Amino acid sequence: MRPHPTPLPSETQPALAMHVFAIGQADSMLFIGPAPERRTLLVDVGEVMGGDGRNHQRIADRLEALLGGRSLDTVLLTHFHGDHTGFWRNGAGQASGLFGLVEQGWTIDTLIDRGDDLRFRTPTRAHQGVMKAAPGWIEDGRLGERISAVAGGTRIDLGEGVEVEVLASAGQTGPGDPGVLGQFAAMPTSENDYSIALEVSVGSFELFTAGDLNGALQPEDGEPKRSTKRFFGERFTNIEQHLLDQWQDREANVEIYRANHHGSRFSTTQPFLDALNPEVILYSTGGQYGHPTRDVVVRGAATAAQLVTSAVSATNWPHGLPEELGHVVGEIVVEVDAGGAGYTVNGGRRRSFSDEEEAQGADSPR
């Protein structure tokens, strides 16, 4: 294990800190565990499609400012799309995202991703890049190991009092679950459907994040669709519903929900939102592809305060995001108190609700 950088001075030492970086239509967020170890988990290192290919530099600058060094305990890639992974080489031969970070000299103890299961789709360019680059990184000491996430099995250590649970990966929700990606084998599934879902908790505080996990558009009869055909020859599988099917005996209520798929219209279905019932929803988006979608934002506003990192869609929000629905704020910082009884979001203090309080509706909108 590589030595940890010296902790930077701070007036407070939260049990858990999370930084959702404002990097446009791409994803990257850092979790820092409690002192003195301050173990790290970087979830995604995305690049904006058609952007300048420099997000990894922006992320590196923030990481160094926060950590005081160039080593990470764990990097988790939710799935293999460039806006979450970056690219090994672009058209000009430049590395971006995770690949650019490693080429800058960053070292990683453990890389976790959804694995190389290609039964239901061909590998994306980002996936091909990881398969080619990771063995070389291990050989030259820049990466300790690469492992595939297993729902209900993979352990991520962020320090005492912090639990990180893998709730879904590659369409499976736990040991013995055959998954749902093979149910529609006549059409390739989207790489989004392989996304890794995590719950991060400290005492009563709980946060859910799941990359670009999809739900489905709901038909008028209310019965959940199990997949949605997309115009580019793939399908979106309703993994949100598959999770709900498995959560019959699970307390799913959370304090913070980092919105699936940037707030896409195929995600954050009403049943899924009802199960999570968050107090705060975070959107990592630069406003491309119509994100976040109006229907999702309106649904979310009924239960939660909402924050957007970089921008909202000018198509869906030509006059900007109304204040009663949410705010565009840049980088989002969450700090959780020791024991998890309270937390702050960009400095605003909130309390966490216990499972018993949530069951009694204490966290419902007033």
Image (spheres, rainbow, N blue to C red):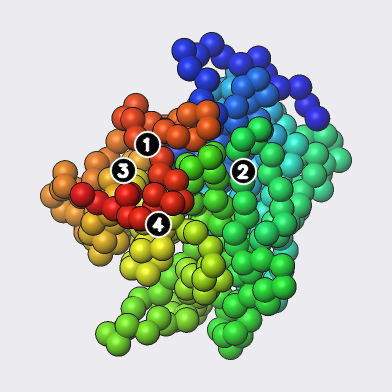
Which residue is under mark 3? 307
Mark 1 surroundings: few (<14), some (14-19) or many (≥20) residues within 10 A = some
The answer to whether residue 215 is visible is yes
Q: CA distance from mark 2 to mark 1?
A: 19 Å
Q: CA distance from mark 3 to mark 1?
A: 18 Å
Residue at the spot x=41%, y=63% of the render? Answer: 275
Residue to which mark 2 is pinned: 163
Residue 287 visible in the current orientation: no
Would you say the residues marked 2 and 4 are in contact, meaning their CB atoms lie under 8 Å apart?
Answer: no
* Cα gap from disc 2 to disc 4, whole angstroms: 21 Å
Depicted 247 relative to depicted 37: above or below: below
Which mark lies nearer to you, 3 or 2?
Answer: 2
Q: Quadrant of residue 272?
A: bottom left
Q: What is the crowding at mark 3: few (fewer than 14 residues within 10 Å), some, or many (at least 20)? A: many
Whole-percent x and y of residue 353?
40, 44
Q: Quadrant of the N terminus?
A: top right
- Amino acid on which disc 3 is placed: Leu
Q: CA distance from mark 3 to mark 2?
A: 24 Å
